[in-house]
Amino acid sequence: MFFPAIKYDEPVFRPPGEARSVIIQATLGCSWNQCAFCEMYTSKKFKARSFEDLKPEIEILANAYKGVKKVFLADGDAFVLSANKLIPIINEINNQFGKLQRISSYALPKDILNKSESELKELRNLGLKLLYIGIETGDDNLLKLINKGETFNTTLEGILKAHDAGIETSIMIINGLGGKKYTKQHALKSAEVINKINPKFLSTLTLSLPYGLDHFQNRFNGDYQQQTIVELFEELKLFIENLDVENVIYRSNHVSNNLFLKGTLSKDQNELIELLNAAIQNTHPNIYPSASSIL
Ligand code: SF4
């Protein structure tokens, strides 16, 4: 949904699941902004916006888009804001919009760990029900090479802390993140961390190199060798084969993906693996589909 009622600080990103949500820029940019593969907010300096700036915007948006059910707090990790800052913003959103289905935002595991259990529960009770977390990989070595600023353990602890407070998570993994050299450890350790998290939603994106291979190789702190499309499918297959989760809604339907997949894990695990086998053997007709899903 496009919201011309206010002027946004571009570029603005939101997850596909928030296509019909009102977007409120509680922060600008990303508080970390150092991941080797990410160019989303490199044009912005991180800034937390003041409640005084946000209040009139919330009022304008609530009046302009009555009946909206969901609000997404942008930018990169609005959840970095302390509970003391988030609570008045969320209270104002609730006052102005009335009953919402949910409020959500991007978050880093450290943003969750920096809040107390009671703060997380209070945020959940006020309607912040979903956090989108790009954990990218479960492999500690690869997390260092991409400069994620997180580890297997901080990722796990942060996400489980959110779950304990009743906040659901949507987790993103990047297919191809480590290239040929790190592909196996990336697939296996990512499956391991997902098995321990059992998120509500899981998605896989594919590494994109908007500034080219050299640019990424210069930012990656290891030996990055780009994979072929078949090798990317093999990595994804290894990842999915090693998942042992329940009722996880899985999507691989980002514009970066070479093959669109969707299903519920583990119910559709074998079907997804068969589709990947067909793609690996180049017998699947829907590689590079235009828009539709294949399950
Ligand atoms: S934390 Fe997310 S938004 Fe920030 S640099 Fe890393 S991938 Fe990009």
Image (cartoon, rainbow, N blue to C red):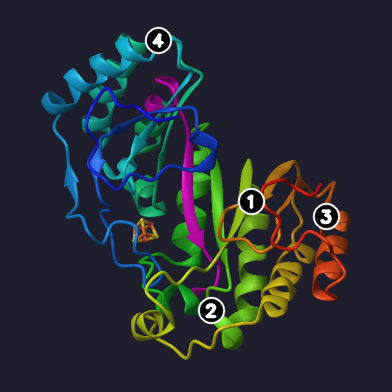
Q: Earlier in the sequence, mark 2 or mark 1?
A: 2
Which residue corresponds to mark 3? 269
Residue 220 vertical position relative to residue 268 in the rendered view, above or below: below
Q: Give the quarter the ligand 1 occupies.
A: bottom left
Q: How many marks?
A: 4
The region drawn magenta spans 122-140
Report the Cα–Cα distance between label 2 and label 4: 44 Å
From the viewer's side, name the closer residue of 208 and 198. 208
Q: Quadrant of residue 58?
A: top left
Which circle, 4 or 3, is nearer the viewer? 4
Report the Cα–Cα distance between label 3 and label 2: 24 Å
Which residue corresponds to mark 1? 253
Residue 53 vertical position relative to residue 136 in the rendered view, above or below: above
Q: Position of residue 232 (x, y in %)?
A: 67, 74
Q: Earlier in the sequence, mark 3 or mark 1?
A: 1
From the viewer's side, name the closer residue of 191 and 22. 22
Which residue corresponds to mark 4? 66
Q: Position of residue 260 (x, y in %)?
A: 70, 54
Q: Is residue 55 inside the magenta stretch?
A: no
Q: Earlier in the sequence, mark 2 or mark 4?
A: 4
